[in-house]
Amino acid sequence: MPAAALKQQLREQLKAQLKAERQLVVAGFAADGKPEKLLRALRKSVDAVLAIAWREAGLPADTALVGVGGYGRGELFPHSDVDLLILLARAPDAATQERLEGLVQLLWDLGLEIGHSIRTIDECMIESKADITVQTSLLEARLVCGDAALFAALEERYLAELDPRAFFRAKTAEMRQRHAKYEDTAFSLEPNCKESPGGLRDLQVILWVAKAAGLASSWRTLATGGLITQTEARQLMEKERAFKDIRVRLHLHAGRREDRLVFDVQTAIAESVGLQTTGSGVNLRRASEYLMQRYYWAAKTVTQLNTILLQNIEARLFEQPGVAEPINERFNDVNGLIDISADDTFERTPSAMLEIFLLMTQRPELKGMTARATRALWHERFKIDAAFRQDPANRALFLRILQAPVGIIHALRRMNDLSVLGRYLPNFRRIVGQMQHDLFHVYTVDQHILMVVRNMRRFSMPEHAHEYPFCSQLMANFAHPWLLYVGALFHDIAKGRGGDHSKLGTVDAAQFCHEHGIVAEDSELVVFMVENHLTMSQVAQKQDLSDPDVIAAFAKVVKDERHLTALYLLTVADIRGTSPKVWNAWKGKLLEDLYRITLRVLGGEPHSADRELKNRQQEALATLRLYGLPADAHEALWRQLDVAYFLRHDASDIAWQTRSLYDRLGSDKPVVKCRLAPIGEGLQVAVYIADQPDLFARICSYFDRKNFSILDAKIHTTRDGYALDTFLVTEQNFAKSYRDIISLIEHELGATLQSQTPLPAPGKGRLSRLSRTFPFQPTVDLRPDERGQYYLLSVAANDRTGLLYAIANVLAKYRVNLHTAKIMTLGERVEDVFLVDGPMLNNARNQILLETDLLDALKV
């Protein structure tokens, strides 16, 4: 048989061998669920094929095939690269170079995803010194086949030139950079099980630096060497096995290398390990939620033990004993870290488990805890039981942490990382690692709560006063601001229990206040915050703030300025703590407007439409005088406007529109004016045109085509039959070229409205990946307002491109008149409220048809 045919036959045999053995290994994993067995079996399978290929290549006797990286460690995940080093005794001649190329080509032809390098020992050392990644991969080098003496020479040279201290610094710096890339949290809703904080890579870092230092090469030898306890070694092995199991399942499910636990695959992975969805309705608990809560608890443990171990290894490497400066009889300051005075400090004095966090708030120069203190606290945390929680001294310590002038957030986060916070507040422990599939929270419940407390805390810090000046001003004048932190800590603590978490959380908050001796007046404030933490955002974003009845009802809920201020600060902190996408300047303005209007009512000033109208008109006239217009320039337009117009627009908006239309009233051509929105975000677009039934839909169609998002719309019809509509819109990149965009909108939108071309059919915009994974059932609710004059149309659905235009198109079909539109986007979900009327709505059958068509339009 010709040589080429023999080579082809060998390729086919090896390829079939790899495939058959892989199928057997995967079937074995499906049966027994043992990831280590699969990883070893896949590695052995590849080892065997590589040995045959190596012999076939006919390379010189003094060459070696070396596994490096994960493959060198003796593990191979289903779709990971096979990292290889072809080690040469000298630079290759032409014949050897040809054989090397043939070997690499053969391995690729076999379907192996190889990552390879061809180097001499000298070249390995040069690359190792230049690149910490190469140095790390060589640390785990393993001879696969070839010259054992050459490989031994590489190992000897590598270890001789390895600087354990420099390696430790480089790997810990690399780890910090990696953590920063993943936002320094193990609680990402879509974590990377390999690279995220608390994942497999953190475990590998420990073993790498320990091995480089000659301290240990496995969890067992770390324990026998005294760097960790047997219990910690067992915990680390369990967590490593759990992460390997998840990573194996991710690779098998995706059919490729995939290390991210994205929403799309979480359910499939959960079901593959035997987890099932339980309950229904408000008691629904998805299989993916069980999986992710297990993941977060494991990552939390790894994060903590990673800190302890690296501190221990660092102490061994750098031998910095430090001088213990006494803080009190229980604690010392050692090199800027707080340490326990004796190994049994927490065992003898359990209350010290809270005292240590209090001391760190009182002494900002302390950068953290020593490994000894951290380990002792970690192991003794189980002493925080019912008796501990009932001890008045411990309750006083916990309150003092919340009342500390600095360091509160660092203390709470450290307490959560060490499971002290969850032990002290058992209901908080229930929401640690709990997912939120509401399409706008991007953090687990516990991380969201701590983020809200952090946001609240920043309102009191002068260095952050520029972020939200009004909030900082209110916080500066608020007596006992620590009560706000208590409200923030409990506002979502009842998530996931079924039922209304706002109501359920009030029970926890009331109990906490009673047990901690908080006076009745302050307790009532905390409970009020928890019960009503969603109220202010709902009123501001869904109701008409120009309606005196709306303001009066809200004022009745908040009762006084103290409650109003507390609720306002919590609302801002809460919205900011859900997702970077949720907060915007428009929501900030709505909340601030509601606060200021309500404050005037609480101060005894009635929210009178007549008074508000006169105030706004006078302020608008004052602004108009600055433009140099005639004294009567406003009269022609204002005669055509009703009270609702003035109550729904700020004085600056009234002045701007009056000036823009001064010499354009009654125009037979559309007038479109655009400016930067005064709130500091987005553009304001005013449209003046003879009214037409499908005007709102036509304008929405234009903004949809231009990829603008509509944040707010105010729709008015003048007495002489002209539409005067105002839109607040935003676009991702408008800030870079807003002048050009303003000119474009004024020209194009005007031309679009004048052309009167037929409305295009609404497109079925694509849902985001998150929305497809967790679809939200759209709802439509149409009901008369309290006066029976208009109808309130509420729509909730998954957000997508063109959604508002699809709604507007249906309204145009039914000749529904739109007066206001409040567009509220919550991450991947929208909740829009429209004030509408129209003769067709007076018929119950038409109302049903409208709701049905709207539901059809909302579906994708």
Image (cartoon, rainbow, N blue to C red):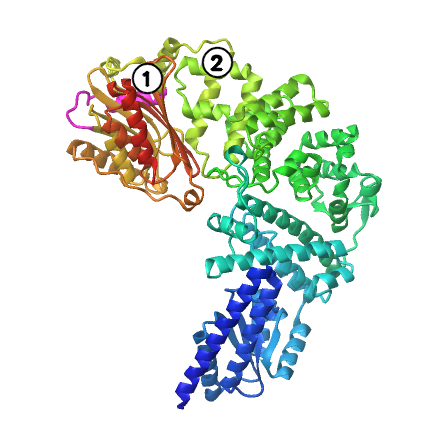
| Range shown magenta | 649-670
Q: Amino acid at mark 1?
A: Tyr
Which dot marks residue 62? none
Left/right placement of residue 411 relative to residue 643 reads right
In the rendered image, residue 68, in percent from the top left (x then y), is placed at 58, 71
In the rendered image, residue 772, in percent from the top left (x then y), is placed at 41, 44
In the rendered image, residue 452, in percent from the top left (x then y), is placed at 57, 34
Tell which tag, 1 or 2, sits nearer the viewer: 1
**Dot 1: element:** loop
- Which quarter shows the C terminus? top left
- Which quarter shows the N terminus? bottom left
The residue lying at 63 percent from left, 69 percent from top is 139
Q: How far apart are labels 1 and 2 at the CA level? A: 27 Å
In the rendered image, residue 404, in percent from the top left (x then y), is placed at 69, 31
**Dot 2: element:** helix
Q: Quadrant of residue 517?
A: top right
> Is any part of residue 684 visible from this angle?
no
Q: Image height check: is 850 above or below 139?
A: above
**Crowd class of label 1 (few under 14; some 14 to 19; many from 20; radius 10 Å):** some
Q: Amino acid at mark 2?
A: Arg
Q: Image height check: is 1 above or below 125?
A: below
Q: Quadrant of residue 759?
A: top left
For disc 2, the marked residue is 600
Q: Tally the numbered discs.
A: 2
Left/right placement of residue 104 relative to residue 761 reads right
For disc 1, the marked residue is 790
Q: Tell me whether circle 1 and circle 2 mark residues in contact (CB < 8 Å).
A: no
Q: Is residue 652 magenta?
A: yes
Residue farthest bottom in this picture: 1
> Is any part of residue 309 visible from this angle?
yes
